[in-house]
Image (spheres, grey):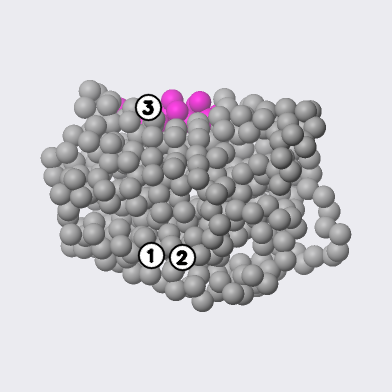
Amino acid sequence: MPSESQIPIASQAASKRFATRLALFYGATFGTIGTHLPFFTVWLKAVGIDAWWIGIISAVPSLTRFTVLPFVTSAAERRYSLRGALTVTALATALGFAVIGTQYLPIAVLLAYVLTCSLWTPMMPLTDAYALRGVARFGLNYGPLRLWGSAAFVVGAMACGLLVDIVAARHLIWVIVLVAALGAVASLGLQPLDRPKAPAVAVQGAGALLRDPGFLAIIVASALTQGSHAAYYTFASITWQASGMGGLTIAGLWVLGVLAEIVVFALSPRFTLAPALLVVIGALSAVARWLITVQEPTLAVLAAVQLAHGLTYGLTQVGTMGLLVRHVPLHMMARGQGYLAACGGIVTSAASILSGIVYAGYGQRVYYLMAAMALIAAVVMWIARHRLKAFPSEADTGSR
């Protein structure tokens, strides 16, 4: 990558403008996730929804990832309208959560959540596709851009953690609505990008990705590792609250994990290991993390274990994006991201539903299932790592 002194001033200004606006959007988007992920299930419980329904409702985002999401990402890519799609989905997300907040019956919440997630879940792959195109266009690094999303997650989680001890849990949904509305506003400032250049030689259609064993290994390994967080995302806050922890303590535990994730993203431009090995390390770290969590550790040990999130989520994400930016043509990046999200949706939805059943009967032992998923992911990527080296790439953008 050329040094900053070798880049024309106009290009430097455009690069900084793109990076700043994308960072703001990442921040607002992950601020929504930061308020939603730790406390949406707490809100569900507060309005009288039982554990069985919570497991079903929590599976909805994952289900929409492999049903509606691929169609949305493909349509946006075909029309060269990633920026427009992000604006529409951000506005729909804010409105959808506002509607959810008016519902209390399990079936009504479920239906409203399905409609909301149908446009909310495509936001992440669309944003990552938009980001990776900007990475290639402006010579940026993915990790430092993405870390602003993690930082905003921390702020969102801490805000809800403070509020849960001050206001009734049944009002937490409106915090989610407010932050989602900020995301809708931030989407309006995203910078248009040039269309990706047509490939110099004829390429197969996007469906060829699904016939490529190496690409399938990437998305399966990522889906299994990230999907192994399903029990943690769904029941960690409920378990901690039941053990007597306050809202601020719960938020602090979530924040510890995300702070570790931020450090990983910030340092990622310095990583020298191959992206495939980063994914293997992330998966093996998840195995260790869930095997410790299942022992119901003390708060001090649990706080230390939460730092592993930087590896189980952050390092896996960096490695996966590094593999995609090397092995998926830029003009097919949105669909590649869509397939990744769809595979993750299948795995995570199944894991969420199964987690609800296992947790209801066996409590913390659900983490044995999560550890097994992560172990399979490590094996898949380890076996596929040599095949991945043979993949063609459009540009050498590293693990950015």
Q: Which residue is mark 1?
A: 284
Amino acid type, label 2: Val
Secondary structure beneath label 3: helix
64 vs 246, left or right, is right
Image coordinates for residue 202, horizontal then vertical, percent: 84, 65
Three-letter code for the amino acid on which mark 1 is drawn: Leu
Instruction: Please tell me which residue is depicted at 77% across the width and 37% down the height of the picture.
Output: 6
State whether the magenta stretch is mostly helix, strand or loop: helix
| Label tally | 3
Name which residue lies at 57% across and 33% down: 23
Q: Is residue 165 above or below residue 141?
A: above
Magenta run includes residue 96 = no
* 43, 381: nearer the viewer: 381
174 within the magenta span: yes
Q: Image height check: is 298 above or below 288? A: above
Q: Nearer the viewer, residue 34 or 174?
A: 34
Q: Is 197 left or right of 377, judged from the image as shown?
A: right
Residue 252, x across and y down, in percent: 28, 36
Magenta region, residue range? 170-184
- The residue under label 2 is 280
